[in-house]
Amino acid sequence: MDKWVIGVDLGGTKIRFGLVSPDNTIVAVRQIPTNDHEGIIRVVARMGEAIDELATHRPAGATLAAVGVCSPGPVDHEAGVLHDPPNLPGLHNTPLRDLLSDRLGVPVTLEHDAKAAALGDFHYGAGRGARDMIFVVVGTGVGAAIIFDGQIYRGRHNSAGEIGHTTLDLNGDRCNCGGRGCVETFMSGPWLGRHYERALVAAKQPPRTVNGEEVAHLARDGDPLALEVMEHAGTALGAAIATMAMMVDVDLFVIGGSVAKSGDLLLEPARHAAPKYSHASVGKRIRILQTAAGDDGPILGCAWLARQL
């Protein structure tokens, strides 16, 4: 496994690159704007330039073995194609993997960003030493990546893990997906803001617009309405985790994403709730941990995938 590789986290606004040494340490990082409106040819060219520059930081005589890239979905990891990620309209239906591989002259792998982050935490973060793990992303949306015996479980149609659009409340809020009471409507960043705004109205306080990050900050500062919103979100997360634990018999749940940066404000209510919504024999085994890989998880997961080529 003495391979120098580069992991690439392709996002809607920025692309983050990490040069990863044979001992799985990120030794250098670069970041460029995505600018997907420029189209796939220009984006691949700029990615190639950034990778070429980053690769100069490897030791003399060491070669770059491969590159791993992750992106928001939908992604066809087998064909190496980006389908229609909502935040990357300029890159829809493009063979990113092959174009970048041709530009670099090294093998390239393409994966969904949540799955890459899951692999990063599984191999190098909170999941180290585990056989099975579910990585739950709580950010602008909510999703999950399932790992059984060290392998990503994708399902027959590569859609396993869509926990964000399972129903917690049949009569709940209308979700962007068209359903009602989805997990996402309880805890995603935009919905945290909406719930806080409703709480202000109910408390007859002056209305204002806030986002999920602001709600978390307000909760840390002791704002009672924000604490109530975070408690409600964490309880919903715990119920969702209990459902997953009952369905697939996995004990370890690692939580990542921007909302998860609120830490125990979200996770402690989840830990208290999970046993209440599952059999006692299941609930007592559930462990809910915050990501240990953090923002580096996708890069490390991409690097791990690149080493498998």
Image (tube, grey):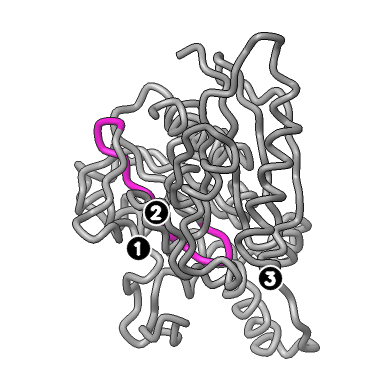
Which comes sooner in the sequence, label 2 or label 1? Answer: 2
Precedes in sequence: disc 1 or disc 3: 3
Q: Position of residue 86 (x, y in %)?
A: 53, 72
Residue 37: numbered disc? 3
Q: Secondary structure at mark 3?
A: helix
Residue that carries the numbered disc 2 in the rendered image: 144
The reply to whether discs 2 and 1 touch (Cβ–Cβ < 8 Å) is yes
- Closest to the camera, between mark 1 and mark 3, is 3
Is residue 155 highlighted in magenta? no
The C terminus sits in image quarter: top left
Question: Taking the image as drawn, is residue 194 in sight?
Answer: yes
Q: Are dots 3 and 2 in contact, CB under 8 Å?
A: no
In this rendering, would 19 be left or right of 121? right
Instruction: Relative to 309, say whether 35 is above or below.
Output: below
Residue 247 percent coordinates (x, y): 20, 53
Q: Secondary structure at mark 2?
A: strand
Callout in the foreground (3, 2): 3
Q: Are marks 1 and 3 in contact (CB under 8 Å)?
A: no
| Numbered tag placed on residue 162 in the rendering | 1
In this view, the residue in front, 279 or 255, is 255
